[in-house]
Amino acid sequence: MTTSITRRQEATQADVAKAIQRSGIQWRSTLFHAGLLLLLLTTLVILLVLLADIMIKAWPTFAERGVSFVTDGLSLNPETAGVFTGIMGSIAIAVIVILLAFPIGVSSAIYLEEYAPDTRLSRFLDTTVRNLAGVPSIVYGLLGGSTDGKNVIAAGITMSALVLPIVIITASEAIRAVPDSIREAGYGVGATKWEVVRSHVMPSALPGILTGTVLTLARAIGETAPLLVIGVATGYFAPPGDATFVDQITGSYTALPVIVFSWSRQTQAEFADTLAPAAIIVLLVVLFVLNGAAIWLRNKTENRW
Amino acid sequence: MTEEPTTDEQLAPRPGAEQAELAAEIRAERKRVTGGTPDDAHDVIIELDNVDVYYGDFHAVDSVTIPVREKEITAFIGPSGCGKSTVLRSINRMNDLIESARVEGRIAYHGVDLYGSGVDPVEVRRHIGMVFQKPNPFPKSIYDNIAFGPKIAGFKGDMDDLVESSLQRAALWDEVKDKLDESAFALSGGQQQRLCIARAIATSPDVLLMDEPASALDPIATLRIEDLMYELKQEYTIIIVTHNMQQAARVSDRTAFFSVDVNEGKRTGRLVEFTETAKLFTDPAEQETEDYITGRFG
Ligand SMILES: Nc1ncnc2c1ncn2[C@@H]1O[C@H](COP(=O)(O)OP(=O)(O)OP(=O)(O)O)[C@@H](O)[C@H]1O
Ligand SMILES: [Mg+2]
């Protein structure tokens, strides 16, 4: 119930006080609020249960093996099998993605947002990029698999192609979020397009670009399917002890999520029951570190002003 | 009020003094300082000749002709949406940034067609600076806000000096001299606008376009800006858009009054009258102008 405040003289203080009083509990609002909270909690609980389950399973491995689980290479013997080769493979893939997908993706985003005129062609390009981001990862695997190289370079290139559309989209969004008034300010003092982009648009968009791209890096490290199609080593292989750098990057390789995949299918129970969960933990730690780096980078670039 | 007391006693707020009275006083003083009504001794520096501006199919401004004279202050007044900003932005080719915008007619600067082939909009903007309707400092330090323009223009002198003098002229120096390397966003809206003015004059343009530079300022800062405009007038040409008619009357030499025609729901701006400010405010040629300045319309 609301009481209207009249402008007439006789509206007393009491009338006003009554008119602006909260009128009972607002059920709809409260219910909506509670519903949102419930959904959020459900998500959290599911995640926590999963994580706890994996932790409990993985615990014996870490307790017995300690760091050697992380520093040992692949082995058919569950007593000595470790994830070192996988970590190396994943890092190599990440490095290739950083060197390949990020520069290409961010440049493409700058072009699309700042330079491309608003024509049918540029809108078509934009839509295409968005559609590419939705293509299932295994398709990229087929693309990568049609090349001969069953090595980490082929894997890195494939992963780069996989995340490229996502890098372009996140970078585009960060660039688009830079208010036009900043561009106008730059042009207003006689800056060229390049000076405006370099000195004003990019610094403002950087935090967003960094967060977005580092999160896509996490995706590249977590993907398994494309690697399986390209031809990653799923079983045991001995990394040549005295291999040269070239041998290493052109030879067999594996990655963390692939190790999880192959171990969970091993006939020896130990692999599936305790080693695979332990490998998952290592993978999660790597991803958390990456996300942490993303947040740190964003804060570092954002706090300047 | 944390404003420092100003030495110019005319600018100090006086308890009880009516705003209009103050304005009249200041106008009298300004007339005394600058020699009253403008004469035609100054050359035309910017000539708008039958300028039409379109946004796509939308005809925003119709056939505007204004000769802007050197070292004068020209004011644009008129109701909201009549195209004052649109015309202003077409003078330094800021409308190039809006893809749908199109300018027809001729805008000449020292006799050179600003829209002629081979004219570089970047160079145009180095000669014709701009202060925008909403304060838009760069998300950088106060110092860098000022230094950016001169730096890209290849300024070789002492940057610290230039930053200081620019801020001083914009009446901001005293407030920011101890925090030059702090973010420009930490300033109040009015301070940000004065920073934008300092930024615009740091590149020493020939002509300064000011789009409602005082709309976010308190009366004291407003008068300081008007003071600054008087000072700048000795060297620069200024075009100012304002909704404050007293301000237009106080500062400008000539005034252009715009209005809007509504035609089948389309609102097209049009220049009603352009003449000496003193004449426009006391003896306008058009009834429409009179209605507007006496507050019977808009
Ligand atoms: N970028 C744009 N795209 C399309 N139409 C625009 C654009 N900018 C302005 N307009 C239109 O042009 C007309 C004139 O706008 P303008 O901003 O020049 O008015 P103004 O006189 O400056 O108004 P105000 O006093 O409110 O600032 C308005 O009808 C407005 O809707
Ligand atoms: Mg405007």
Image (cartoon, coloured by chain):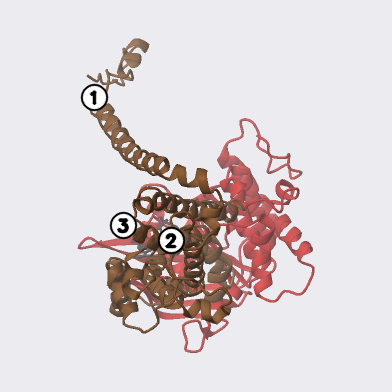
Chain colours: A brown, B red
**In terms of secondary structure, where does tag 2 sit?**
helix
| Ligand 1 within 8 Å of the CB at mark 1 | no
Residue B15 figure quarter = top right
The residue singled out by tag 1 in the image is A27
Q: Of label 3 and label 2, which has the lower sequence position?
A: 2
CB atoms at circles 3 and 2 under 8 Å apart? no
The kind of residue tagged 3 is Thr
Amino acid, disc 2? Leu
The quarter of the picture showing ligand 2 = bottom left
Name the residue beneath numbered marker 2.
Answer: A256
Classed neighbour count for the residue bearing mark 3: other residues with Cα under 10 Å, few (<14), some (14–19), many (≥20): few
Q: Nearer the viewer, mark 2 or mark 1?
A: 2
Give the camera-side residue of A228 and A76.
A76
Q: Chain of mark 1?
A: A
Q: Residue furthest left?
A: B264
- Residue A267 disc label: 3
Q: Secondary structure at mark 3?
A: loop
Q: Are marks 1 and 3 in contact (CB under 8 Å)?
A: no
Does the image show residue B176?
yes
Depth check: B295 or A217 in front? A217
Q: Picture coordinates of residue A114 (x, y %)?
A: 44, 72
On screen, residue A70 above or below A121: above
Position of the N terminus of chain A by quadrant: top left
Asked which quadrant contains residue A174, the reply is bottom left
**First-in-chain label (2 vs 1):** 1
Can you name the residue that lies furthest to the bottom here?
Answer: B117
Q: Tell which subunit mark 3 falls on.
A: A
